[in-house]
Amino acid sequence: MAPDGYLYLAEQDSATGQHVVGVIPAGASGVARSIPVSRGNHLIAAGPDGTVFVPNPAEHTVSIIAPNGSTVDRTVTVGAGAVEVAVTKDGTAFVTNQDDGTVSVIPAGAKTVSRTIQVSSTPGKTENPHGIAAGPDGTIYVTNISSDQVAVIKPGADTVAYRIDVPGGPTEAAVGQDGTLYVASALSPALAVIAPGATAAGPSIPTESNPGHIAVAPDGTIIVTRPGNGTGNGSVSRYASAASVAASAPASAPASAGTRAGDAAENLWTSPAGIAGAAGAAALLITLLIVAVQRRRTAALRDRASGTEEHPADDHSAGIWSGHADAGQSK
């Protein structure tokens, strides 16, 4: 959703197979126009001026659509496996490159990347950065799936300031207006809650299993999607903010008390004993998820080259978003 109320959708034309960005004006009851983009899984972001950014994982680029535009205005080359975009208040776009272990920075109006930030611990290797979010002060948060960490980049910086441990394969992040960071993980039925400026996660918010994309509403509540295969198998849920949960909890039963619904699964990832006991299985499952994604993308690219492709060239996160643990399923 752009600030002017325009809604942009990643779609595929059923007749031609062309992947497009559908545009629904504010108040409209249908798609007004469609903008052709490359094949693949596009996780769209809109800047404060209405500029739309469309990452193209298979092509290692980002397509940029001008405010209220009808075509792609320009295409910027970024790193390998560009998957998500976050835009700060000044219009700067930050792009996670999952295959490179980096983040590309595109200044407002620019036609090229201004700098590339290494977000994996070891240069030249990837920890599969995926989700990305911008805080109100311009701080950037990047989820690294395979290292169980969120990398924190301060405004204007070229390096990671520090890393926050979030067990379970952190996949998605969203920031509230108060600067609180919420992180969803592939193997945890809970949202990690990180206070503004904190270097460690606080009490988590239990959710349904397999949390997917997340967003924070203006009133502070958190909206979480739960992907599913087939009609009627997914869901969208709304949860109270971390501040509301803490304020309403009795003094003798804090928000992280074991009496809450979903704590049996949550405690596996918040207690040292649980983490130690499940670390081997978690590492193996996350590895399988990543390998499955890479194999799907390689096969899709091979099919595309031979002209037999039936699915998007890069459903880069298919193994994760299709119920996370079911790495063999499709989106």
Image (cartoon, grey):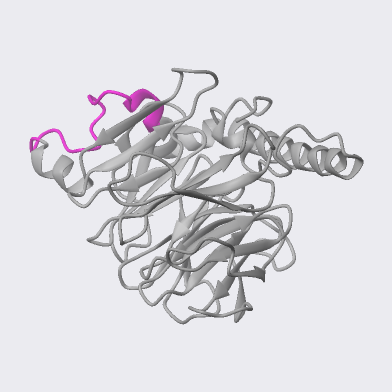
* Residue 103, image quadrant: bottom right
Q: Residue at x 78, y 38 (%)?
A: 295
Question: Is residue 261 magenta-colored?
Answer: yes
The residue that appears at 88% across and 45% down in the rendered structure is 305
Q: Is residue 269 magenta?
A: no
- Please state the horizontal and vertical placement of residue 100, each as a whole percent of the image: 70, 61
28 relative to 306 in the view: left or right? left
Q: Is residue 107 visible?
A: yes
Please give left or right for residue 224 compared with residue 309 in the image. left
Which SS does the magenta portion mostly show? Answer: loop
Q: Give the x, y percent position of residue 30.
A: 39, 40
The one nearer the camera, 299 or 283, is 299
Horizontal and vertical percent for residue 66?
49, 68
Q: Which residues are magenta?
A: 250-267
The C terminus is located in which quarter?
A: top right
Is 316 positioned to the left or the right of 237 in the image?
right
